[in-house]
Image: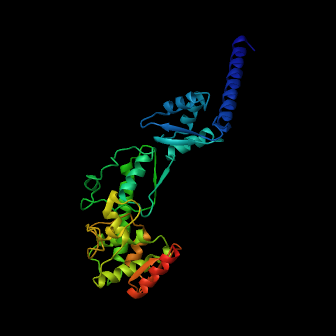
C-alpha cells in the first residue's frame, strides 16, 4: 500500500470517526431534555423571530448549550415558528419544543365574568388584570357602545358571564368583544325559544328582565319562579317593585341599606314609582336567567320575599305576602 492510499484510508477513518461522533452527539441532543427549571419556564417568541433567534434565546436563558444541533435538526425536520408566549416544561426534548412552537400551543389564560356584575365592575376587573393589554378607561363607559357596535348608549347587561380564554398580548377590549358576541348568541337563542305569551316586545326587554332575575336570586331552582312573578305582574300592569332596580337607580348614593325614602324617590329605575321595565339592564345576566325569562314558571304567584335561608317565599295574594314578610322580620 503506497503512501497516498495510507493517507486516504486515514482520512476516511477520520471522517468516519467524526461522523460517528457527530451522530452520537446529535442523538444525545435529541434525547437529552432541555435544561428547564423544575417548575417550568416561560419563553416569549416575538413576531417575525427566526429559528436562529429562538435558539439564541434558549442559549441566553441557559436552556440549551449548542447551536449546531439545532441547525441540523431544523434542516432534517423543518418546523415553522409561531410567535407567542410558551411554557417550557421539565423533561421536554428539543423535538417536543419545536413541535409546540410549530403548532402554536401558546400559554392560554382565563378571565371570568361573574353573573350579576355590573358593567362598571367588569371594567374594573379588566383593569386589575395585568395579563391583559390595557386599552380602556375603567372610569368611563362613554364611547364603548359605539366601539363594540352596541345599539344605544348603555353597555349594561351586554356581556355574558362566562370564562374567556386569552393569550399574552390580547387586550381588555378583546374580552369585551368575546363576551358581547357570546351574549348576542345566547339572547337570540332564548328569544327564539321563548314562550308565546311573554309581555316582552323585543330581545332587549328580555335582557333587561333577565338582569333583574339575576339580581333577585342566586338559586338556580328559583330563577323560573322569580321570572314567573315578574311576567305575571307585567301582564297585569302591576309595578314590578323590585329592590335591585331601585339600588341601581341610586348609583353611588346607595350605602348598602335600602330605606323607605329610597323606594319613594323617583328615578327611571325605580320600579316602585314607575310601571314596566327600567330603561336598561341593571346587571350582567347569565344564560340561566335568560332561559328563565324565556320559559317562566307557570302559576299564580305575584309576590316573593326572602325566607332568611337564601331562598324566597312566594305568595299569590298580598295578604299571604304580608304574613311572609312578618315571618321574615321576626327571624331577623
Quarter of the rendering containing residue 48: top left
Q: Nearer the viewer, residue 22 or 214?
A: 214
Q: Nearer the viewer, residue 211 or 27?
A: 211
Q: Is residue 198 visible?
A: no
Q: Position of residue 262 (x, y in %)?
A: 32, 67
Q: Position of residue 272 (x, y in %)?
A: 30, 74
Please give the count of numbered marks on the rendered protein. 0
Q: In percent of the image, x 51 and y 44: which residue is there? A: 102
Q: Position of residue 332 (x, y in %)?
A: 51, 73
**In the visual, does 107 lie left or right of 180?**
right
Residue found farthest to the top: 3
Against 9, residue 209 (above or below) is: below
Against 328, residue 166 (above or below) is: above
Q: Position of residue 249 (x, y in %)?
A: 31, 64
Q: In percent of the image, x 29 and y 70: which residue is there? A: 270
Q: In percent of the image, x 48 and y 77: which residue is there? A: 328
Q: Nearer the viewer, residue 96 or 317?
A: 317
Q: Is residue 278 visible?
A: yes
Classify the position of the N terminus by image quarter: top right
Q: In percent of the image, x 67 and y 35: which residue is there? A: 27
Against 201, residue 166 (above or below) is: above
Amino acid at each position: 500500500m503506497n503512501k497516498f492510499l495510507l493517507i486516504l484510508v486515514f482520512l476516511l477513518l477520520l471522517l468516519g470517526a467524526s461522523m460517528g461522533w457527530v451522530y452520537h452527539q446529535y442523538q444525545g441532543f435529541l434525547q437529552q431534555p432541555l435544561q428547564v427549571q423544575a417548575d417550568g419556564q416561560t419563553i416569549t417568541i416575538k413576531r417575525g423571530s427566526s429559528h436562529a433567534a429562538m435558539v439564541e434565546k434558549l442559549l441566553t436563558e441557559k436552556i440549551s448549550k449548542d447551536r449546531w444541533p439545532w441547525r441540523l435538526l431544523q434542516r432534517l425536520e423543518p418546523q415553522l415558528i409561531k410567535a407567542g408566549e410558551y411554557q417550557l416544561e421539565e423533561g421536554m426534548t428539543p423535538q417536543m419544543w419545536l413541535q409546540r412552537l410549530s403548532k402554536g400551543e401558546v400559554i392560554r389564560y382565563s378571565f371570568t365574568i361573574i353573573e350579576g356584575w355590573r358593567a362598571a365592575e367588569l371594567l374594573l376587573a379588566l383593569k386589575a388584570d395585568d395579563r391583559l393589554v390595557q386599552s380602556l378607561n375603567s372610569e368611563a363607559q362613554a364611547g364603548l357602545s359605539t366601539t363594540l357596535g352596541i345599539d344605544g348608549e348603555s353597555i349594561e347587561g351586554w356581556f355574558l358571564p362566562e370564562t374567556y380564554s386569552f393569550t399574552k398580548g390580547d387586550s381588555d377590549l378583546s374580552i369585551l368583544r368575546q363576551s358581547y358576541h357570546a351574549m348576542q348568541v345566547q339572547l337570540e337563542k332564548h328569544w327564539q325559544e321563548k314562550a308565546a305569551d311573554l309581555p316582552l316586545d323585543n330581545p332587549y326587554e328580555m335582557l333587561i328582565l333577565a338582569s333583574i332575575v339575576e339580581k333577585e336570586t342566586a338559586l338556580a331552582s328559583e330563577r323560573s319562579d322569580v321570572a314567573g312573578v315578574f311576567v305575571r305582574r307585567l301582564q297585569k300592569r302591576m309595578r314590578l317593585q323590585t329592590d335591585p332596580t331601585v339600588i341601581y337607580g341610586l348609583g353611588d348614593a346607595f350605602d348598602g341599606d335600602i330605606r323607605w325614602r329610597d323606594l319613594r324617590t323617583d328615578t327611571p329605575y325605580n320600579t316602585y314609582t314607575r310601571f314596566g321595565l327600567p330603561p336598561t339592564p341593571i346587571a350582567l345576566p347569565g344564560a340561566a336567567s335568560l332561559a328563565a325569562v324565556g320559559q317562566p314558571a307557570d302559576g299564580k304567584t305575584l309576590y316573593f320575599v326572602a325566607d332568611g335561608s337564601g331562598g324566597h317565599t312566594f305568595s299569590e295574594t298580598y295578604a299571604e305576602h304580608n304574613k311572609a314578610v312578618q315571618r321574615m322580620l321576626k327571624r331577623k
